[in-house]
Amino acid sequence: MSGLLILVLIVVFMLPSLLLMRKQRAQQAEVAQLRASLAEGDAVITIGGVHGTIVAADESVLGLEVAPGTVITVERTSVAQRAARPEDV
């Protein structure tokens, strides 16, 4: 009986962790796909909350225009999401 109880406890505690890890892997894959698909002209928001439009794209670095004539350089990994362009809103 003790062996069965231990087995049940292991399953009860391991199943939620396995499901959580699976969900995290899916989210990581989605973010990696987003970052790989970024191109010039895309409106994005960085992890720090900076809004801008991509004007130059390299393998790991992006040029973001954050105001007319103002371009900053950020790492591709700093992009959190695509943003709606002002004309789309």
Image (cartoon, rainbow, N blue to C red):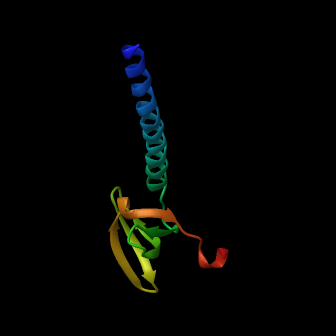
Q: Residue furthest bottom?
A: 68
Q: Residue at x 44, y 45 (%)?
A: 24
Q: Quadrant of the N terminus?
A: top left
Q: Residue at x 44, y 55 (%)?
A: 35
Residue 5's image quarter?
top left
From what the image shows, is residue 32 above or below residue 72?
A: above
9 vs 51, nearest the viewer: 9
Residue 44, percent from left and from top: 49, 68
Q: Residue furthest front?
A: 1
From what the image shows, is residue 3 above or below residue 67?
A: above
Residue 40, percent from left and from top: 48, 66
Q: Quadrant of the C terminus?
A: bottom right
75 vs 21, nearest the viewer: 21
From what the image shows, is residue 72 above or below residue 68?
A: above
Residue 20's image quarter?
top left
Give the number of marks: 0
From what the image shows, is residue 11 above or below residue 25?
A: above
Q: Residue at x 38, y 72 (%)?
A: 48
37 vs 81, nearest the viewer: 81
43 vs 20, nearest the viewer: 20
Residue 78, percent from left and from top: 37, 63
Q: Residue at x 59, y 74 (%)?
A: 85
Residue 21, percent from left and from top: 42, 39
